[in-house]
Amino acid sequence: MLGQVRSRFIRSGTTTENRLEVGGEAKPIQPRRSAGTADAMTGDVTTRFALEVDMIDPIAESARSLLGRLKAPEDHHVFFEVPAVGSVPDVVIAQFNHQAVHTRLAAGQGPVRDMTAVRTLRCLTAGVRDLDVVSDHVGVSRAHLRRSVLGQLAEDGWVEPLASREGRVELLHPFLPLLSWMVTVEAKRSKWREAVSQARQHLGFANRAFIALDEAHMGPAREVSSGLADVGIGLMSVDAATMQARVVSQPRGRRRPDATSQHLVGERLWDLHLQGRTSGPVYPVFGRELARSVTA
């Protein structure tokens, strides 16, 4: 995660302005870089990022280069710090399934943000109707499923309200996955092992995962880039001097994320999209709330 510091990115044409949003007003800010250090032999000065958050702008601008052979890569959305499954990726690049979104909007049904509710609706969409079977599949007690999960889904218009002793659940609308695919990026200035650990978690719900490091600290990770690619993790470098990001190695092989986990993250991304937001929950920083968003 990037921690508590957030900024607002405003795109105009092909350029992106990095701004800090305070009290509804977005003010331009400059990326924070260290003064740099000189090489003892050559005298060359290396510029480094002072904060990981300042690496995000170049990563977002390079999103297209991370998509490989994914279907229709030009049709994508970029999100930041999205609450996922067991982690919060710094950058998420995703493509919505237009047919699934159209079906959902036509039914008038909103996002489903809870994992148990997602599991329940996926089970029902697969054709299961018996309450006991659904309970076993979802992994909660029959009483909890009836009272809490199905009760809320009935209020939200997904299922018919259950009669007091009824053991059959009737689904009112199909619950289709809203994403076609998803790619994540974990940004770190130098802690590449920590980034790899988090990227491994991302592969549980993402089709591709990358780590992005400050170019000034790339050495150790570059040496193991081939091994990372073999386990499905790509590598990026971000140059603080040029504010450019580039792909060092692409992940190899095709991996299928857990369908239920990706379904849940897709619901949360669509929730943000409907709100006109591209970042997860905001956190107080120095007594104020700062948020990052990207607008086309």
Image (spheres, grey):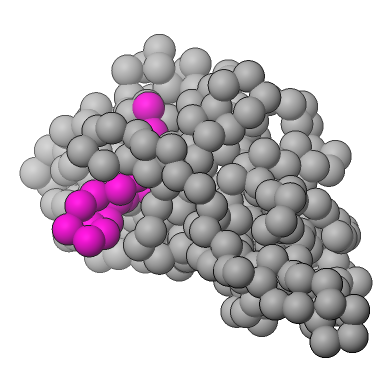
In the current view of this chain or complex, which residue is farthest to the top?
106
Does residue 38 show up? yes
Where does residue 142 sit, x and y in percent of width and height?
24, 60
Q: Is residue 278 above or below residue 190?
A: above
Q: In the rendered view, does 107 fall on the left or right side of 214?
A: left
Image quadrant in which you'd find residue 193: bottom right
Where does residue 256 sit, x and y in percent of width and height?
72, 54
Q: In this view, does 94 lie above or below 103?
A: below
Residue shown at the point (58%, 33%) measured from the top left: 16
Does residue 209 show up? no
Is residue 230 or residue 132 the one in the foreground?
230
Q: In this view, does 189 lie above or below 103?
A: below
Residue span colored magenta = 276-292
Image quadrant in which you'd find residue 187: bottom right
Q: Does the magenta stretch include residue 279?
A: yes
Q: Label the magenta part by its dominant secondary structure.
A: loop
Residue shown at the point (76%, 78%) measured from the top left: 38
Residue shown at the point (50%, 22%) measured from the top left: 101
Q: Quadrant of the C terminus?
A: top right
Q: In the rendered view, does 40 fall on the left or right side of 54?
A: right
Q: Is residue 272 magenta?
A: no
In the current view of this chain or complex, which residue is farthest to the bottom?
40
Is residue 4 or residue 257 the one in the foreground?
4
Where does residue 15 sit, x and y in percent of width and height?
63, 28
In the current view of this chain or complex, which residue is farthest to the left?
164
